[in-house]
Image: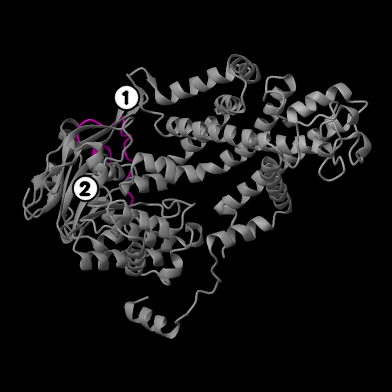
C-alpha cells in the first residue's frame, strides 16, 4: 500500500446464509483506489460488485450478511474496526455513495432542497441562509437548470436524469474524498447516461476526488476508467489500467466479455456469448470458478483456485494457464 | 449534445421563469384539500366543534358561568328544545341566559345546552389526549419493531417478536373491560380516563406502523440516507415516519372518534367523569330513562357524537389524500 492509496480492500469476504449452505457472495476480493483516480469494478449481475461496494460503507445488513474476513483501509483507518458512530460520521462526509435507482433513492415526501440540505447539515454546522446558498450551488454544479426553483420540487416532479443529478449533488454535499457510484446510469436512457458520465468526469477533474464506479457496461468503463477490476463469482479475475484490459485482456473471462461487445467489424455476424451461466454463489465449482465456461480449461483448473499472475506494470490476471502460454 | 451546442442552446433559450407557476407547500396543500368537499365539511364541523368546546369551557366554568350546567330547576324539568321558560316560577338568577331552553332541560331541570357545551370540552380533550398517547406509543413501538426487527435480544428473541407479542397480549384483553377494571381501581377523573384509553388503544397503530416500516426500510432512499451518514433515530423518525404517517393519521382520526365513543360508553355506564360534571355520555345515559317522554335527552348527545365522529373520519380521509405526494399533480 503506497502513500497514494486512498482506499484499499484486502481479501474481503462477505457471506450470506442461503438455505442450509452459505452463499459466498464476495470471496477474497482485493482492490485499491488511489487519490484522484477513477476505478471501475466490472462484472455481470450477481458477481458481488454491489456487495463489495456496500461493505466499504458497512451498509450490508448484518445479519444476514456476515463479513467473514478481510480488511478495508480508508486513509489509514481500518473501516471494519470502527464503531458504528464513527462509521456514521464517515459516511457522506468522507465516502459518499450514488445508487443505482435514482427513481427510488430520494425520499418521496421531502423536497429535494430538504434532502440536499440534510446531506450538508448532518455533517456540518451551517446557518439556514448559508445552507440555502450551498444547496443552490450544489445543484448548479451538477448542471441542474433553475436550481433555485428546483429546490422546492418533490422528487416525483423531476425526470430520472434530474433525480440522478440530485443524488450526485447530495453525494458531493460534503466534498467527500471518495464517491462510490453503484451503476448510477443503468436505469437511465443512453443520452442521459452520456450526460451523467460527462458530469462525473468533469466533477472528478474539478474537485480532485476518487471515484469507484461499479458497472456491467464495458462501454462506460472505456469512457471513464483509469484502472479496471474485473470481477467474477465473488473474486477479482483481472486488474489493470484501461488500455491493458481493453487491448491485452489476459483472462478468458475478460476476453469473453470483450468478444461479446458489438462492433463495426462484427456487423451482420452473430455476437459471441460466453457459454453457461454465473455459478450460484452457494454452490461454486471447486478450483477456478470460471472453469466450466472456459475454453482454455485444463485439469488443474478443476482442482486449484488460481493465483494472480503478474503481467507487469500493474496488470494482473487470475489465469495461470494463459500465463504459461503467453510467449507462445 | 456537445458542450458548445449546450452553451448555445442555453444562450438562445434563457427562461426567466420555469413554465409552471410555483406555489408554496401550504398553498398547494390547501388547493388540493379544497377539492375534497366532504373533507372540507369534516374540517368545518371539526373547527365548529373545537370552537364550541373552547368557548363552552369558558362559558360554563367559573363561579357564575354564563350557561350554568349544574343549575337545578325542578319545576322546569323535561322541557322540550326551544321551550320558553316559565318566568313566573323562576328566581331571576335561574332564568336561562337566552330566555329559551335551546336544547330543552333534563329530569332535574338543568339546561341541556349548557351541559352539552361542557361535555364538548370533555369529549374533545379525551379524544385528542387519548389518541395522542396511543399514537405516540404506537409510532414508537411500531417504528422500533419494524426498523430494528432483526436485532436479537440476548440471542433468544428478536425485538420484533418481543414487541409484537406484547401487542398480541394486549389485544387479548377485551379492552373495554380492561378499561372498566382500571377505572374501577383508580380514582374517577377525566385524566385517568384519557390515559387509560390511550394506554389500551395503541396496538392497532403499532401494527400499522410496523407494517409500513417493514416495506419502507427496504426502500432505496433509506439505504441512501444511511450512506449519507444519517443516524438510525433520524432515519426512523424523519425519513421513514412521514412516509408511514398516512395510515396512522387515518387510524388516529378514527381513533379520536372511538375514544370519544369509549368515554361516552364509560360515562353511560357510570364509570366515567364523576356526576356533577356533564359529558355527552352521561347526558345520554341519564336520558335513557326518559327516552319516550323526552327523546331529545338521548337524541341530542347521540347526534352530536355521530356528527363529530363522522367529521373526524371525513377529515382524516381528506388529509390522507393530500398528504400522499403521489396523488399530487405537477404544479
- The total number of labels drawn is 2
User: A303 or A163, which is in the foreground?
Assistant: A163
Give the numbered dot on residue A252. 2
Q: N-terminal of the two: label 1 or label 2?
A: 1
Please provide percent x and percent y for residue B211.
Answer: 51, 34
Name the residue at 28% across, 55% down: A125
Numbered disc 2: secondary structure: helix
Q: Does the magenta stretch include residue A286?
A: yes
| Residue range of the region highlighted in magenta in the rendering | A272-294
User: What mark, if any, has residue A292 been given in the picture?
Assistant: none
Q: In this orientation, which residue lies closer to the viewer: B309 or B281?
A: B281
Residue A217 visible in this rendered orientation of the protein:
no
Comparing A126 with A5, the one in front is A126
Judging by the rendered image, the residue that carries numbered circle 1 is: A21
Q: Which chain carries label 2?
A: A
Residue A276: % across, % down: 34, 41
Q: How crowded is mark 1: few (under 14 residues within 10 Å), some or many (20 or more)?
A: few
- Does residue A116 appear left or right of residue A314 in this picture? right
Q: Main secondary structure of the magenta part?
A: loop
- In three-dimensional space, the C-alpha distance between marks 1 and 2, rounded to whole angstroms, equals 29 Å
Q: Where in the figure is residue B60, as x and y percent of width and height?
A: 71, 39
Chain letter of the residue carrying label 1:
A
Which corner quadrant of the image does residue A172 belong to? Answer: bottom left
**What residue lies at 50% left-to-right and 74% top-to-bottom?**
B18
Left or right: where A161 falls relative to B102: left
Amino acid at each position: 500500500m503506497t502513500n497514494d492509496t486512498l482506499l484499499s480492500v484486502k481479501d474481503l469476504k462477505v457471506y450470506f446464509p442461503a438455505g442450509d449452505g452459505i452463499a459466498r457472495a464476495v470471496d477474497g476480493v482485493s482492490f485499491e483506489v488511489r487519490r484522484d483516480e477513477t476505478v471501475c469494478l466490472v462484472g455481470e449481475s450477481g458477481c458481488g460488485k454491489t456487495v463489495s461496494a456496500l461493505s466499504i460503507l458497512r451498509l450490508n445488513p448484518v445479519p444476514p450478511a456476515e463479513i467473514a474476513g478481510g480488511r478495508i483501509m480508508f486513509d489509514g483507518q481500518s473501516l471494519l474496526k470502527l464503531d458504528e458512530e464513527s462509521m456514521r460520521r464517515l459516511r457522506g462526509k468522507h465516502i459518499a455513495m450514488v445508487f443505482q435507482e435514482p427513481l427510488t433513492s430520494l425520499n418521496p415526501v421531502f423536497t429535494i432542497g430538504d434532502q440536499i440540505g440534510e446531506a450538508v447539515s448532518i455533517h456540518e454546522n451551517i446557518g439556514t441562509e448559508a445552507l440555502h446558498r450551498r444547496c443552490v450551488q450544489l445543484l448548479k454544479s451538477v448542471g441542474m437548470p433553475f436550481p433555485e426553483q428546483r429546490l422546492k420540487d418533490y422528487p416525483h416532479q423531476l425526470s430520472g436524469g434530474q433525480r440522478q443529478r440530485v443524488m450526485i449533488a447530495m453525494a458531493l454535499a460534503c466534498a467527500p474524498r471518495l464517491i462510490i457510484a453503484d451503476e448510477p446510469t443503468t436505469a437511465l436512457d443512453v443520452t442521459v447516461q452520456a450526460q451523467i458520465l460527462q458530469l462525473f468526469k468533469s466533477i472528478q477533474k474539478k474537485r480532485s476526488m476518487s471515484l469507484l464506479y461499479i458497472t456491467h457496461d464495458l462501454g462506460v468503463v472505456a469512457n471513464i476508467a483509469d484502472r479496471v477490476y474485473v470481477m467474477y463469482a465473488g473474486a477479482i479475475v483481472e486488474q489493470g489500467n484501461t488500455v491493458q484490459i481493453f487491448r491485452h485482456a489476459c483472462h478468458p473471462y475478460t476476453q469473453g466479455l470483450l468478444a461479446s461487445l458489438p462492433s463495426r467489424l462484427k456487423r451482420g455476424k452473430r455476437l459471441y456469448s460466453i457459454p453457461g451461466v454465473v455459478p450460484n454463489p452457494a454452490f461454486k465449482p471447486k478450483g477456478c470458478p470460471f472453469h466450466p465456461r472456459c475454453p482454455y480449461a485444463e485439469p488443474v483448473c478443476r482442482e486449484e483456485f488460481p493465483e494472480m499472475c503478474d503481467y507487469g506494470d500493474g496488470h494482473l490476471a487470475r489465469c495461470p494457464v494463459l500465463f504459461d502460454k503467453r510467449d507462445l | 449534445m456537445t458542450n458548445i451546442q449546450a452553451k448555445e442552446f442555453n444562450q438562445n433559450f434563457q427562461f426567466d421563469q420555469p413554465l409552471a407557476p410555483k406555489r408554496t407547500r401550504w398553498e398547494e396543500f390547501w388547493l388540493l384539500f379544497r377539492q375534497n368537499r366532504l373533507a372540507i365539511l369534516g374540517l368545518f364541523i371539526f373547527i365548529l366543534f373545537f370552537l364550541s368546546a373552547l368557548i363552552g369551557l369558558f362559558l360554563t366554568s367559573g363561579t357564575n358561568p354564563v350557561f350554568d350546567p349544574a343549575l337545578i330547576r325542578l319545576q322546569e324539568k323535561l322541557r322540550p328544545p326551544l321551550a320558553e321558560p316559565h318566568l313566573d316560577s323562576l328566581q331571576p338568577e335561574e332564568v336561562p341566559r337566552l330566555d329559551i331552553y335551546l336544547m330543552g332541560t333534563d329530569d332535574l331541570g338543568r339546561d341541556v345546552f349548557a351541559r352539552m357545551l361542557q361535555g364538548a370540552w370533555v369529549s374533545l380533550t379525551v379524544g385528542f389526549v387519548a389518541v395522542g398517547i396511543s399514537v405516540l406509543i404506537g409510532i414508537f413501538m411500531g417504528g422500533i419493531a419494524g426498523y430494528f426487527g432483526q436485532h436479537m435480544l440476548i440471542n433468544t428473541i428478536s425485538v420484533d417478536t418481543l414487541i409484537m407479542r406484547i401487542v398480541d397480549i394486549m389485544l387479548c384483553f377485551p379492552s373495554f373491560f380492561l378499561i372498566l377494571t382500571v377505572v374501577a381501581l383508580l380514582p374517577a377523573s377525566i385524566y385517568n380516563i384519557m390515559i387509560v384509553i390511550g394506554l389500551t388503544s395503541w396496538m392497532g397503530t403499532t401494527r400499522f406502523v410496523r407494517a409500513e416500516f417493514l416495506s419502507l426500510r427496504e426502500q432505496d432512499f433509506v439505504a441512501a440516507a444511511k450512506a449519507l451518514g444519517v443516524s438510525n433515530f433520524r432515519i426512523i423518525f424523519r425519513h421513514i415516519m412521514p412516509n408511514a404517517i398516512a395510515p396512522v393519521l387515518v387510524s388516529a382520526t378514527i381513533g379520536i372518534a372511538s375514544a370519544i365513543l369509549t368515554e361516552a360508553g364509560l360515562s353511560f355506564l357510570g364509570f366515567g367523569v364523576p356526576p356533577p360534571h356533564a359529558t355527552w355520555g352521561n347526558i345520554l345515559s341519564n336520558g335513557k330513562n326518559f327516552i319516550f317522554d323526552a327523546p331529545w335527552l338521548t337524541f341530542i348527545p347521540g347526534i352530536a357524537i355521530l356528527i363529530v365522529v363522522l367529521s373526524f373520519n371525513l377529515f382524516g380521509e381528506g388529509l390522507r389524500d393530500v398528504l400522499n405526494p403521489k396523488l399530487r399533480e405537477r404544479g
